[in-house]
Amino acid sequence: MLEAIFRIPKRMKRKANNTTVKCWCKHCKAELKPSHTGPCPKCGKTGKDCAVASHVVVGIRASTRIRQKRAGFKKFLLEVISRWKPSINPKLKDGVHEDRTIDKSRREYHQTIKDAKTGKVIHEEHERLENHKGKPKN
């Protein structure tokens, strides 16, 4: 019934919790059941107002990417990335959080990957940039 009135998307229905529908007479404000049809049992007039309240949990993940550019350097001088990304590991269903810094002026590469749910460090790299270049991607 609720879907027909408000056309709630299927993916939203799965996340909605504690949805309540309250109805009352338009004229005397007597509380009515949502399924009630016909005249009000208290005042005898027709007309019903309804309100729907739903508690929905929404998750937001923010990512940041900063690049410092300077004349004489190809692409960028410094890049800092902090982001959430999905994991190919089925044990990490909530994904991973990656912090990565590429500093060409100091010739450094730093990367830390943590479990997004627990914060436990899964992978960590701190090395010279020239040692990092040319590594095969896993």
Image (spheres, rainbow, N blue to C red):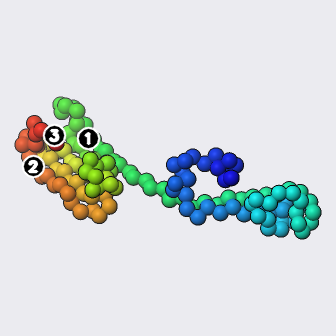
Residue position marked by numbered label 1 in the rendering = 68
Q: Is residue 137 above or below residue 62?
A: above
* Snapshot quadrant of residue 112: bottom left
| Circle 1 SS class | strand
Residue 133 in view (yes/no):
no
Please name the amino acid that badge 2 sits on.
Glu
In-image side of 106 versus 30 (left or right): left
Q: CA distance from mark 3 to mark 1?
A: 25 Å
- Identify the disc placed on residue 137: 3
Name the one closer to the observer, 101 or 119: 119
Residue 19 appears at what percent x and percent y? 61, 61
* Residue appearing at x 24%, y 43% in the figure: 79
In-image side of 102 versus 54 (left or right): left
Determine the residue located farthest toward the left in the rendered image. 131
Please name the amino acid that badge 1 sits on.
Gln
Residue 12 appears at what percent x and percent y? 54, 51
Residue 69 appears at what percent x and percent y? 25, 37
Q: Which of disc 2 and disc 1 is earlier in sequence?
A: 1
Residue position marked by numbered label 2 in the rendering = 127
In-image side of 46 versus 108 (left or right): right
Please name the amino acid that badge 3 sits on.
Lys
Q: Which of disc 2 and disc 3 is earlier in sequence?
A: 2
